[in-house]
Image (cartoon, coloured by chain):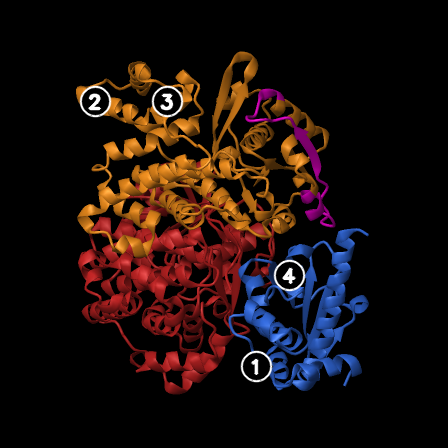
Amino acid sequence: MSNKYYEFENGVRIVYGKESLKEELPYQLKQLGANRVLLISGPVLNRIGTVDMVREECERQGVKIQAVFIDVPNDSSLEVVANIAQVYLVNGCDSILAVGGGSVMDTAKGVKLLLSQGVSDLSKVMGMNMVKKGEKIPFVLMPTTSGTGSEVTKVTVISDLARNTKLEFVTAEILPDVCVLDPILTTTLPPRATLLSGFDTLTHAIEGYTCTQKNPLSDATARLAIKLFAQNIGGAIDNPLDLDSRLRMMICSALAGASFSNSMVGAVHAIGHALGGECHLGHDISMSILLPYVMEFNYDIAKDLYGNIFRLMVDDSTYKKVSDKNYGRACIEYIKGLYCKLAQQVGAATKLNELGVSREQLEIVADKAMRDGAMLTNMKALSRDDVMNILIKAFE
Amino acid sequence: MNLNFGKVLFAKTVFGALGRAIKGGYKIDSQIVRLVQELPNDYTVIMSVKGTNAKLSFTAFEDNLIVHKLKKAPKSGDLEIVFKSIDCVLPLLCGFKGIGQAYSEHDFIMRGDICKGMVVVDLISLIEAYLFPTFMLKRIMLSVPKTEKSKARMYGYFISGK
Amino acid sequence: MKAFENKTKILCGKGALDKLGYELDYFNCKAPLIICDEMTDKAGYARELKKKLRGMDITAKFLSLNIVDRGELSHLEKARKAFYEYSCDSIISLGGGGVTDIAKALKLFVNTGISNLSEINQVQSTDKTTLIVIPAFLGNGNEGTRFAKIYNTSHNDCYDIDSTAIAVNAVIIDESLSYTVSEKSLRESAIYALGMALCANVERISIFSKSYACAALSILHDNFLNKKRYSKSNKNAVMSAMIYAGIAFSEVEDNILIALTREIAEFKKVRRDIAFVCILPHYINMFINKFNKVNHTLLLLLVGDEEFSNVEEDKRNDALLNTIEKIYTAHNKLYGCSTKLRDYGVSVGDIDNIIEYTMQNCGQSLDGQMEYMLKEILNRAI
């Protein structure tokens, strides 16, 4: 069953390079007509001085930061989004700048959606591609991690704490006008977070490349992302202050984000979302642990594609050493080995039972995973039993 | 005869048949009952086609399922699946495309909780498994869901209403 | 510091046109002006579009222009009048490259309020009018870019427009609009797309643009190379490759290759895409060592993963050149599509003049080595 039709959209102006915070961010804001900016970030970034650095640079170059919101929690919620929207309106802001990781960017996207659609309750615009083009609000994102790719994706997930559920919004309306990638903002990312966010990126690229909605453009961006990942993940972990590796990992993340945003993902994300919801595991650690096991499950359908991925990740001598030309299998082993090696180096978990997940919870996770939209686009259909098998293998 | 008029008439007819099949499936297949029970109580689902008045709608209750007739269909629902045009929905209704492929190919937009949307997608897939011959299903689905009863039983419901 | 921007949404494949009503609705457009050329109109595509919009609460107005090859000022004026007369709120172009250029220029007029292209640089512009491009032939690779060319035949002049304000909001590439494409034009366009994608891959452009170039090469590998017959979906795919290659190529800054192409086109009145195709393989051959890092990627994309694995690492440059030569030879044999400039009226005696004009317009001085390289390229291309 192959798709005869596809769509691709990446309407974000991506500005990247060393010093892009100083040389580009204020300029881009001015180009968008931003006069009174709402700056959104998180408490950790505020504590380590990133928020001040961004604010000072903008104001030094004549861009007024009208208001600042630095209390975005790890898990974004409707209440937080509504509070920030209120801050925006009360202070007469005319644009949004978000500096942070996945949760900050997701929250900012929710705020933009709420304001541009002119609704008071975000759940009214919940869904997939159901909103129309709304009011123009200049919107800029500056990621401080290189993992989620949220700076270029059309998806955001916001929690509804009252109903204990996560709401998903899929629409081009939440794409930022500009995203600015400055590696200086990721140098404070500790090695463990670098590894996990890197593997999150790799999962996006691999799933984007192997799902049912794949298309030539998403394939091309995924391939470039996989290549960049393989060439730079080691450097970014070993030398956190190496701006070149950091920049390439940010580019890798944006490429992988563009890929999966236009081709969807698969079972790794479906099961990972369920693990996050039920066991409160971080998205990145779930992806990192689950990836090779889902690849094993998909192997008989996707082995040629895995072979291509292996080609991109290793040098010629390693490629030629593979016996029986079983490149697909070699790919899975390579990724598993790479993660284990780096996880040991940085002290990250390699199995779910190391993270406090109980065996009983796996049953609930399997049920939830079957209801995730990402299951629909996995290359191979999964039954609930298949999901349980994957979880058990990843568990111990 | 205007070709578009013919297409809309066909869509309305097939939606009607689908509605009847959902009602029948609820009576004969416990998988469908379980799927309906996953939806919240008094939860209305509407499938419609942009630019036409072709519509399929049903409301799920804890212990019941009501499939609405076209003339009495609610104007809005908790979950709305809207196909982008009549030409986007026809391949699905003719069995040339599964609902999964329709999702992959952006044939419809969805208002509401996407998780609940996946329940409806599974429901439609099961109904397709009842209605279409196996050789067609294998072409349009990654994996054909197993039905509890036979296709004959479903067609029997169509004819007799039992 | 690098930047990449392309806001064009791509809708490609069977049934893409079925999504047109939704796309217009997304952009809050109720009254599009659909501009097409007479050939498109005669092929029945305009009628096809009308059917797709039926029942959508959209009042589309159609304007058919006698554009043969390129958009002229007179066409633009007619389009501008029609836009305001019918109180349209958006623009759809349906047809070839000339129609697309007219639609883009019209968007600029509507966005800025100017009525004369000479005023382009004097006004600020925002992207407030929706423009959807529906290529009905193979186009010119500009469908997804911020460039347009409008000719002023009476003054033997042309306006080159380069503005993000004419960015295309969506490109709809539907299989059903490719059946009038002849195999000869398909091959010509595919070779041009191949050339643009190769050139974009070797030059210093953003990696995001390169992804479009890589996608184009991949599509051409699967749908054009080594094929003798082309189905509707192959033609559709080549149309899309043309657009992606165009997007990537639009980021390439002026280099020797582009400058040479331009001079040959203006000096010897050879079609620009033909001149480009003739020169490209020799340009790559001459500078192959400069492109060393990307050659492996190019070879991988042109021959596929399996064949690439069989080529020794130190032989990949040669393999790339051989592959390009094979492609060109195959192209020459079928339908008599020549890739030699002599078949287009360029002779060895023209070389010195071409080089002189090229270097003048590049603003560069000619050293011995550069002169030798350019002469070699042109000799081989002729």
Residue A149 at x, y percent in the picture: 39, 56
- Of the two numbered discs 2 and 3 in the rendering, the one whose residue sits closer to the viewer: 3
The amino acid sitting under disc 2 is Tyr
- Of the two numbered discs 4 and 3 in the rendering, the one whose residue sits closer to the viewer: 3
Chain C representation colour:
orange
Residue at disc 3, secondary structure: helix
Dots 1, 4 in contact, CB < 8 A: no
Instruction: For residue A94, say whether it is visible.
Output: no
For label 1, the residue is B146
Q: Which residue shows up at 40% across the image and 23% down it?
A: C343
Measured in 3D between alpha carbons, the distance from the residue under mark 4 to the one under mark 3, in whole angstroms, is 52 Å
Q: Is residue C339 magenta?
A: no
Query: Is A394 situated above or below A152?
Result: below
Is A312 left, or right, of C183 in this rendering?
Answer: left
For label 4, the residue is B91
Q: Earlier in the sequence, mark 1 or mark 4?
A: 4
Is C304 left, or right, of C27 in this rendering?
Answer: left
Residue A283 at x, y percent in the picture: 38, 68
Measured in 3D between alpha carbons, the distance from the residue under mark 1 to the one under mark 3, in whole angstroms, is 67 Å
Residue at disc 2, secondary structure: helix
- Considering the image in quadrants, where does the C terminus of chain A appear? bottom left
Q: Which residue shows up at 68% across the image and 31% down it?
A: C63
